[in-house]
Amino acid sequence: MKFSENQPGLKARLAHMAIAVSSAATVLTVGVAAVTAIPATAQSLASDVAQALQLRLPKTPIDEIACDRFGPWCEVVSGETLFYIDKSARYLLVGRLYDMEERRDVTASRLLELNPDLIAASAARANPSANENAAGASVADTVDLSTLPAEGSIHWGNKKGPKLIVFSDFQCGYCRHLVDELGKAGVLVEERPISILGSQSRRLAETVICSNNPASALHQAYEGALDPGGASCAETRGLDANEAFARSNGFAGTPVIVRASDGAVLHGYRDANTLREFAAPTKEQRK
């Protein structure tokens, strides 16, 4: 008896294969549906992306991954740099990410939050032997406020509190957080916008300074609720003066806080207690 006589015919075998493939496809479809029906948590997704990155970029240190902030993109923090990767860990984006609803450069804001020591003014403070910033201007410990015009300032806060002058950028993440701390500190704030983060910062500043209620517009700008259309009014001359003053005194980053009573300078974000102590009159001034 030949071996082939006990084997099913070709047509029968093909029919069996078709049934098997169809059954496997059905099982696979059901399995995929079951998996995708279970929403992955942001934490587990970030963990999966991290594992994929370790395989594809083994020499790149991964300090932090967040997959719940920017739609299809995961934000990756690597040392002092920032990049984005899609949730399949296939496409990597190096560049600026803009929030069209809030109308702000989220990459610039995030980098300032992550790397405050990279700001030139902060770097000069960290190194006592350095007396110049990246632009070549000396970084001042005290400044002469008499050269600043009345234009270009927005006043808000406690009218009876000690006065602080804050040089800020409405797209700066630390400036946004500083607003809350200034409110808690109970100080009077004279805020003077400077455009550290580019043309959109300038348009926001113009919109705020020319509004009917600059203090209200200022808070809207920080919340991303103000259209940065720009405006033209006499007060915008003060914005040019603010930026000239900042350059001449080596203010290469924001925020910069100046005590109105004597021109003492404090660079960078500070909490409410520090601001309250800094704003209080010195012993010499109380005499």
Image (cartoon, rainbow, N blue to C red):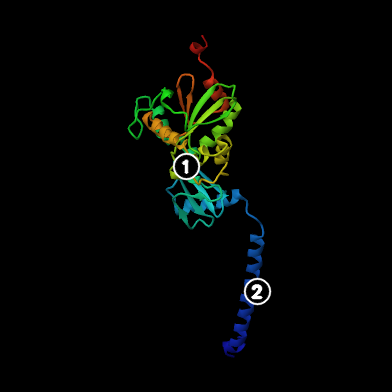
* Amino acid at dot 1: Ser
Q: Is residue 135 visible?
A: yes
Asked whether, in this view, residue 257 is left or right of residue 38, the answer is left
Asked whether, in this view, residue 152 is left or right of residue 29, the answer is left
Asked whether, in this view, residue 284 is left or right of residue 23, the answer is left
Give the residue furthest to the top: 287
Q: Position of residue 227 (x, y in %)?
A: 54, 46
Instruction: Check disc 2 and report the residue beneath it.
Output: 23
In this view, the residue in front, 191 or 62, is 191
* Amino acid at dot 2: Ser
Give the residue furthest to the left: 136
In this view, the residue in front, 126 or 241, is 241
Instruction: Check disc 1 and report the residue beneath it.
Output: 232
Q: Is residue 171 visible?
A: no
Q: Which secondary structure lies at badge 1?
A: loop
At a point 60% along the width and 89% down the height, the residue shown is 5
Q: Which secondary structure lies at badge 2?
A: helix
Of the residues tagged 2 and 1, which is closer to the observer?
1
Mark 2 and mark 1 lie on one chain; the one further toward the N terminus is 2
At a point 49% along the width and 30% down the height, the residue shown is 166
Asked whether, in this view, residue 95 is left or right of residue 162, the answer is left
Instruction: Report crowding for label 1: few under 14, some 14 to 19, many 20 or more residues within 10 A (C-alpha).
Output: few
Quarter of the rendering containing residue 273:
top right
Q: Position of residue 162 (x, y in %)?
A: 55, 21
Quarter of the image with the N terminus is: bottom right
Q: Position of residue 67 (x, y in %)?
A: 56, 50
In whole angstroms, how far apart are the C-alphas of marks 2 and 1?
70 Å
